[in-house]
C-alpha cells in the first residue's frame, strides 16, 4: 500500500559523483532523460528510469510529473549572513565602511527575539524561493538570533548550519560580546542545537579584527569541546582588512597565522573569501584541509578582488561557492554561479557549466563534509531537491530554441536564471517553495 509519505518525482535527473572535466566526462555525472526518484519518509529510496521506478513503487503511489524540467539536488550556500537580510543592496565603499555603516547597526536589532523570528521567516522564504536547501550562516552576536535561526529551520525540516557570531572589539558595544560571554553563549547554543534534528552548530568568530586573542582562544576551546562542529570565519578579503589585522596581531606570520595559532584550522573550517593569499598561507590551507569559500557577488560588490580558483585548487586546497548575502547581492546560487563565472573569466579560467552545477551541489556538500546526506540524488540521502526550468522567461525560452546539449541548457540556467527558474524546492520530499 502506498502511504502519503511516499511519492515519485518524474523528470530529467542530473546528479554528480565527482567534479566533471567536461560533457564527455560521463563518469562524473549521471543524467537520466526520463528518470524518476522514489521518495519515502524524506529520503531517496530509488533512482532510475521512470519505467523501473514505477515498477517497484507500491501501487497507488503519488506521481509528481516535472517533465520536461531538470531535477537536481537542492542548491547549497556555504556562507551567508542571516541578520543581514535587511541590508542587502546597501550603497557602501569597501568592506570596513560597509560593516560600520550598515551591518553592525542591523545586527544590533537581533537582541530582540521577535525581530529575529520575523527575519528568519523572510530569510528561509528567500532561500527556498531560490532553490537553496542548505546554508551555513553567521547569526548575530546575540543568542536570540541563533534560536530564531534554528527554530525556523526546524519548523521547515531544513538541514542548516550556523552559529553565534563571536566579536568582542572594533564594533559598537551593542553588536559585541566578551571573550567569556561568547564562550559561554556558544557552548550553551552548541549544546542545545548541534545534532538536534538536522541542525549543525558552527563556531563563528567573525574575523580577526573583531576578536581579541582571548576570544580566538575561546573559539579554539569550543572546537576541542565540540569536535563535530564546523568553524567559519573570514580571511584575506580586503587590503585594508589585512593591514589592520597585521597591526592587531603583529607577531603572526600572516593573516592565516592568526587562526592557525589558535587551532582554528581543519577539514571543517570554512574560510570566506581567501582572495589575497601568500605562499605560506596556501601551504597551511592545504595541510590542514581548510576550505576556501568563493563569494563572487560580494567580492565584486565590495570591490574586494578576484578569487583564484585554479591557483587554490592547484595548491591542493578545497573550495566552495557561496552568496555571502548581505555583502553578496543575491540569494540565488544561479546568479552566484554566473558572477563566479565572470570573475574566473577575468583570470582566463573558463568554468564549464557542468563544473558550476557540480560545485553548487556535491562540491559544496563535500566542502561541508555532508555529502552522505545532501548534495546528490543518491539512494539513502535526504530528499532535498530543486526542479529547474531553463525556459522560465521569454529571454530564456528564445535562447533555448537553439540549445542542443545539457551543458548548453545548464549555461542558460546559470547565466539567465534566478528564482523564476525554480519550479519547486523539496525539503525531505515535501514541496517547500513559498507561494505555491
Ligand atoms: Zn561574509
Image (tube, rainbow, N blue to C red):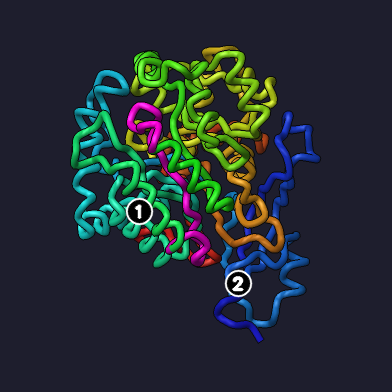
Residue 271 x %, y %? 50, 32
Q: Is residue 132 visible?
A: no
- Asked which quadrant contains residue 286, the reply is top right
Which quadrant does ligand 1 occupy?
A: top left
Left or right, 28 with reference to 385: right
Residue at image point 52% right, 23% down: 257
Which of the two discs, 1 and 2, sits closer to the camera? 1
> Mark 1 CB in 8 Å range of ligand 1?
no
Residue bearing the label numbered 2: 7
Magenta stretch holds residue 194: yes
Give SS at disc 1.
helix
Q: Is residue 376 left or right of residue 91?
A: right
Quadrant for the N terminus in the image? bottom right
Q: Out of 179 and 390, give the one closest to the viewer.
A: 179
**Residue 393 point in image, percent of width and height:** 42, 40
Residue sitting at x 23%, y 50%: 110
The residue that mark 1 highlights is 185
Amino acid at each position: 500500500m502506498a502511504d502519503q509519505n511516499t511519492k515519485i518525482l518524474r523528470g530529467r535527473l542530473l546528479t554528480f559523483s565527482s567534479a566533471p572535466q567536461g560533457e564527455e566526462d560521463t563518469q562524473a555525472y549521471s543524467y537520466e532523460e526520463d528518470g524518476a526518484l522514489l521518495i519515502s519518509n524524506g529520503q531517496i529510496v530509488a533512482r532510475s528510469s521512470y519505467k523501473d521506478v514505477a515498477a517497484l513503487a507500491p501501487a497507488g503511489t503519488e506521481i509528481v510529473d516535472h517533465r520536461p524540467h531538470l531535477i537536481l539536488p537542492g542548491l547549497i550556500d556555504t556562507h551567508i549572513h542571516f541578520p543581514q537580510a535587511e541590508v542587502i543592496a546597501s550603497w557602501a565603499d569597501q568592506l570596513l565602511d560597509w560593516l560600520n555603516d550598515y551591518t553592525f547597526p542591523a545586527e544590533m536589532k537581533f537582541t530582540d527575539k521577535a525581530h529575529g523570528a520575523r527575519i528568519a521567516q523572510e530569510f528561509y522564504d528567500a532561500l527556498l524561493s531560490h532553490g537553496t536547501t542548505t546554508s551555513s550562516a553567521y547569526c548575530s552576536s546575540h543568542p536570540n538570533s541563533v534560536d530564531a535561526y534554528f527554530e525556523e529551520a526546524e519548523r521547515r525540516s531544513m538541514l542548516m548550519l550556523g552559529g553565534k557570531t563571536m566579536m568582542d572589539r572594533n564594533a559598537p558595544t551593542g553588536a559585541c560580546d566578551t571573550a567569556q560571554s561568547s564562550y559561554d553563549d556558544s557552548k550553551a547554543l552548541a549544546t542545545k542545537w548541534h545534532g538536534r534534528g538536522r541542525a549543525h552548530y558552527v563556531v563563528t568568530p567573525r574575523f580577526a579584527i573583531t576578536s581579541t586573542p582571548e576570544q580566538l582562544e575561546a573559539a579554539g576551546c569550543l572546537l576541542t569541546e565540540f569536535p563535530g562542529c564546523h568553524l567559519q570565519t573570514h580571511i584575506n578579503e580586503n587590503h585594508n582588512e589585512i593591514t589592520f589585522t597585521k597591526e592587531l596581531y603583529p607577531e603572526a606570520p600572516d593573516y592565516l597565522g592568526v587562526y592557525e595559532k589558535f587551532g582554528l584550522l581543519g577539514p571543517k573550517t570554512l574560510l570566506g573569501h581567501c582572495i589575497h593569499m601568500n605562499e605560506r598561507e596556501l601551504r597551511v590551507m592545504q595541510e590542514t584541509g581548510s576550505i576556501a569559500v568563493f563569494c563572487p557577488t560580494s567580492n565584486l560588490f565590495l570591490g574586494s578582488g578576484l578569487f583564484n580558483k585554479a591557483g587554490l585548487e592547484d595548491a591542493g586546497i578545497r573550495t566552495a561557492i557561496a552568496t555571502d548575502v548581505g555583502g553578496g547581492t543575491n540569494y540565488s546560487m544561479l546568479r552566484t554561479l554566473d558572477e563566479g563565472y565572470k570573475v574566473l573569466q577575468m583570470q582566463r579560467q573558463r568554468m564549464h557549466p557542468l563544473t558550476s552545477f557540480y560545485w553548487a551541489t556535491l562540491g559544496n556538500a563535500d566542502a561541508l563534509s555532508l555529502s552522505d546526506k545532501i548534495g546528490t540524488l543518491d539512494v539513502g540521502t535526504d530528499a532535498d531537491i530543486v526542479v529547474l526550468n531553463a525556459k522560465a522567461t521569454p529571454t530564456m525560452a528564445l535562447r533555448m530554441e537553439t540549445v542542443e546539449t545539457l551543458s548548453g541548457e545548464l549555461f542558460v540556467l546559470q547565466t539567465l536564471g534566478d528564482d523564476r527558474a525554480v519550479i519547486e524546492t523539496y525539503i525531505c520530499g515535501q514541496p517547500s517553495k513559498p507561494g505555491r
